[in-house]
Amino acid sequence: LAKTTQPISMDSYEGQEVNITCSHNNIATNDYITWYQQFPSQGPRFIIQGYKTKVTNEVASLFIPADRKSSTLSLPRVSLSDTAVYYCLVGDNNQGGKLIFGQGTELSVKP
Amino acid sequence: GAGVSQSPSNKVTEKGKDVELRCDPISGHTALYWYRQSLGQGLEFLIYFQGNSAPDKSGLPSDRFSAERTGGSVSTLTIQRTQQEDSAVYLCASSLAGAGSNSPLHFGNGTRLTVT
């Protein structure tokens, strides 16, 4: 199982771009990289998923280098409502099996 | 459409009592996960169900914890003889894992268990 390492916390200001990097040195060939967002008193919510290179959707971008040993979640122009915990999850969900979350990154956006 | 539903949303119980937590996954989702989240902490894996296969129970912290999934749908997590250290939010998630896509997890909002 691929173990992930993320910064425990990050601070930002409204309107800035925020980049959160996750290390996953022992990622397996079939593993995908998925990021989740969690607000207090709620379950985590899917943000974005990728396998390699770059993926972009309406809320974020995900950058994955060629060796896939890390990934970076990019949140453009954050707002106060982006204050949350962000989890990087690496695993082969297609085959099933237990998926282990890391400790997550607590992002605090200030006005 | 309907998401993952968990009940009750809050449960307060006395030490030593048994509790049952329920999870209704998204219809058609073959995989179901239980996680535990203590205050201010990350998600701790408990158990995983995939279709009709034997569940992966490797995350259950003690033999007081058990879970079943009836008919490949609803799941119940049971904690016997509850202890104060069992106090946490118990989260359930489901996905289409194994259906030929890398479907992400869909979480419920959890059951907050408080053992007094």
Image (spheres, grey):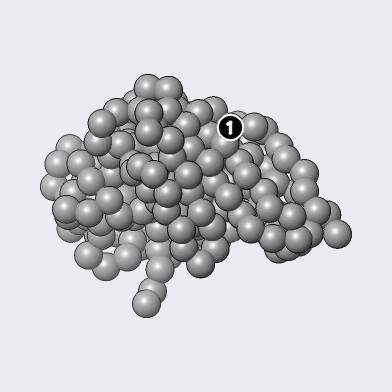
Left or right: residue B67 versus residue B17 is: left
Give the image quarter of residue B60: top left
The residue indicated by pointer 1 is A6
Q: Residue at x 58, y 50 (%)?
A: A74
Kindly give the residue lying farthest to the left in the view shown.
B52
Quarter of the view holding residue A68: top left
The picture places residue A79, in percent across and down from the top left corner, at 73, 62
Task: Give the residue at the far top of this rendering.
Answer: A26
Side of B100 where B61 appears, left or right? right
When the figure is inspected, residue B109 is found, relative to residue B49, above or below; the finding is: below
Location of the C terminus of chain A by quadrant is bottom right
> What percent of the width, then of the height, locates residue A45?
50, 57
Q: Mark 1, chain letter?
A: A
Of the pair A48 and B79, the residue shown nearer to us: A48
How many numbered discs, if any? 1
Q: Secondary structure at mark 1?
A: loop
Q: Position of residue B20 (x, y in %)?
A: 43, 50
User: Which one is in front, A33 or A104?
Assistant: A33
Q: Residue at x 29, y 59 (%)?
A: B74
| Nearer the observer, A69 or A40 | A69
| Quadrant assignment for the N terminus of chain A | top left
Q: Is residue B83 above or below residue A58?
A: above
Q: Is residue A18 visible from the viewing direction of this image?
A: yes
- Can see residue B38? no
Give whichever of B84, A88 is nearer the camera: A88
Coordinates of residue A110 in the picture (x, y in percent): 83, 54
Q: Residue furthest right?
A: A111
